[in-house]
Image (tube, rainbow, N blue to C red):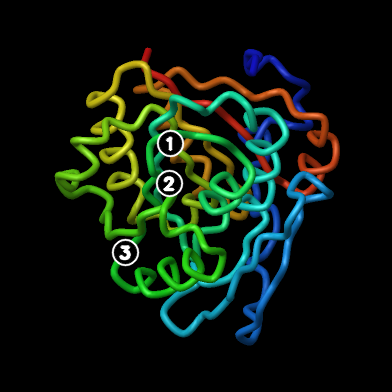
Amino acid sequence: MSARSRSSSPEFDPLAFDQDFTPLPEYKAPTDTALDFGGLLPEPLKLHEDLKTGCGGQLWPAGMTLAKHMLRYHGDKLQKARILEIGAGGGLVGLAVAKGCSFATPMYITDQLEMEELMAYNTTLNGLNDKVKSMILNWGEPLPEEIVALKPDTILAADCVYFEPAFPLLLQTLKDLLALEPNATVYFCFKKRRRADMQFLKAARKTFKITELEDEDRPVFSREGLFLYAFTRQ
């Protein structure tokens, strides 16, 4: 999948917005959802959404966008990939990839302790326990032994930019992961909600090579304030 430089039109540049762009969506009650991502999955992904342990328990727009991107453009390119999702919430992106893509090495979907039960529940709900392992990975802390052993080269991160005090912790974890596997790519999607969100991207550019990923849905999701990038080592 090719990526293009960030010389795109200013209307799609997240740094061009100097004011708060859109409010956070309202939370919703626990529910069960089935998703086929516009027919990209022959059998829908089933997800239980529950906010009792945090906002990661519901579906968010960047997760939907990244999952669809991976299914559309990487479905047959991950056979040898070592896949990790960070900030997985209920596991939307990783479980969609597990359901729709072929790969030999079991992937890890990770988040904080509060999300562990929901990640495991949704993994079992989709019969993916042989392909997906859920575990705790706290940003800014040393990487778990299992992740060090995995040396992931395909890292998924959606809607991880939402809480400014966590930005340095997220950056540290991304640095650690790319130091662990210098040829890794981080597929990174976020929705610009506040001016502070752009500080993360500014800081990331000092450490990583950041390119904007081609996607046929870009005209649609760009209008919604969503941005899709690849992070690699400089």
Image disc number at residue 112: 3
Residue matched to label 2: 85
Q: Position of residue 11 (x, y in %)?
A: 79, 31
Residue 9 x/y as whole percent: 78, 22
Q: Residue at x 63, y 29 (%)?
A: 74
Label 2 SS:
strand
Q: In which quadrant of the rendered view does residue 183 lie?
A: top left
Q: Secondary structure at mark 1?
A: strand
Between 72 and 52, the one nearer to me in the picture? 72
Q: Position of residue 194 (x, y in %)?
A: 58, 54
Question: Which residue lies under the disc numbered 1?
Answer: 155
Q: Residues within 10 Å of mark 2 (few under 14, many from 20)?
A: many
Q: Is residue 75 above or below residue 211?
A: below
Mark-to-mark CA distance, 1 and 2:
6 Å
Which residue does the image show at 27% across and 30% down from the upper left? 151
Pointers 3 and 1 in contact (CB under 8 A)? Answer: no
State the residue at coordinates (14%, 44%). 145
Q: Position of residue 5 (x, y in %)?
A: 63, 13
- The picture quadrant where one finds residue 50 is bottom right
Amino acid under disc 3: Gln
Whichever of labels 2 and 3 marks the residue nearer the N terminus, that label is 2
* Snapshot quadrant of residue 12: top right
Horizontal relation, residue 12 to residue 145: left or right: right
Q: Determine whether, in the image, residue 213 is placed left or right of residue 196.
A: right
Give the alpha-carbon distance from disc 2 to disc 3, as whole Å.
12 Å
Circle nearer the N terminus (1, 2): 2
Amino acid type, callout 2:
Glu
Q: Tell me how far mark 3 sits from mark 1, CA to CA.
A: 17 Å
Asked if the residue at tag 2 contacts the one at tag 1, i.e. Cβ–Cβ closer than 8 Å, the answer is: yes
User: What kind of residue is marked 1?
Assistant: Ile
